[in-house]
Image: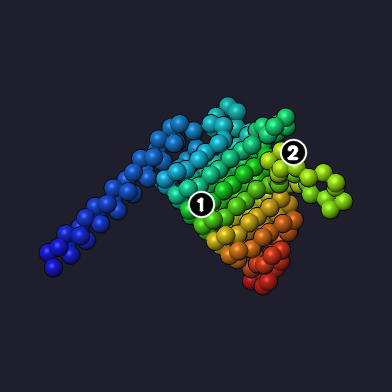
Amino acid sequence: MLVYILRLKLNLIISLLSKVRRKLKAKFLVLLSGYDFKMVGKNFKLNVKPYSAKNNTSSKWGSMRVGDNCWIEAVYNYGDEKFEPYLYIGDRICLSDNVHISCVSCLILENDILIGSKVYIGDHSHGSYKVCSPEIEPPANKPLGDIAPIKIGNCCWIGDNAVILAGSEICDGCVIAANSVVKDLKVDKPCLIGGVPAKVIKVF
């Protein structure tokens, strides 16, 4: 019984230390980048120019909680290409583990969005693929293509393993089901979105 109690106390201490570490890391990132992180998990990659009140055209963020192994990037150069990405992230955004957000054009996440694990949100693709094209080359060597803005409205919930691609405009209050692939979908009413390719399943 005593061993069990000691284990419980040890687990509680480890949990508290982990929470403190995440908060301290968030504060360090706030000082380093200028963005408002509330909590940050391990192995977080941030490839975005530091925020400056004098020059805030490239990115603007509210408060955010970030899980483990997340990657947020604004792509300014790829090969010989140059981009001017605008990445807007609103207040009270929660990212679960293994979320990748990538922007070369315009990517807007409004307020109070909950993003599940293993979610990808990107406004571009590695090249344009045409059936009639005779050329076959490595995807990493292709110029970025299929570029179009993404906007996700307030109070949306994005399920695990969802993929949100270029041209998606999702209004306030929507739910994107797990394992969905959303592309070029424009939704103007709160609804449930799901499938591959994703479509409106139910209007709330």
Mark seen at residue 143: 2
Residue 10 falls in which quadrant of the image?
bottom left
Q: Nearer the viewer, residue 33 or 153?
A: 33
Amino acid carrying label 2: it is Pro
Determine whether the residue tagged by mark 2 lies in a helix, strand or loop: loop
Amino acid carrying label 1: it is Asn
Q: Is 163 on the left-hand or right-hand side of 92?
A: right
- Vertical arrangement, residue 91 with respect to residue 7, above or below: above
CA–CA distance between discs 2 and 1? 26 Å
Residue at the spot 72% in from the left edge and 57% down from the top edge? 183
Determine whether the residue tagged by mark 1 lies in a helix, strand or loop: loop
Q: Is 70 on the left-hand or right-hand side of 153?
A: left
Residue 84 visible in rendering: no
Q: Is 112 on the left-hand or right-hand side of 127?
A: left
Residue at the spot 35% in from the left edge and 40% down from the top edge? 24
Q: Nearer the viewer, residue 54 or 68?
A: 68
Per the image, the residue denoted by label 1 is 98
Residue 161 falls in which quadrant of the image?
bottom right
- Can you give x and y, in whole percent of width and height, for residue 3 in the image? 15, 63
Determine the residue located farthest toward the top in the rendered image.
54
Residue at the spot 55% in from the left edge and 43% down from the top edge? 72
Q: Is 142 on the left-hand or right-hand side of 37?
A: right
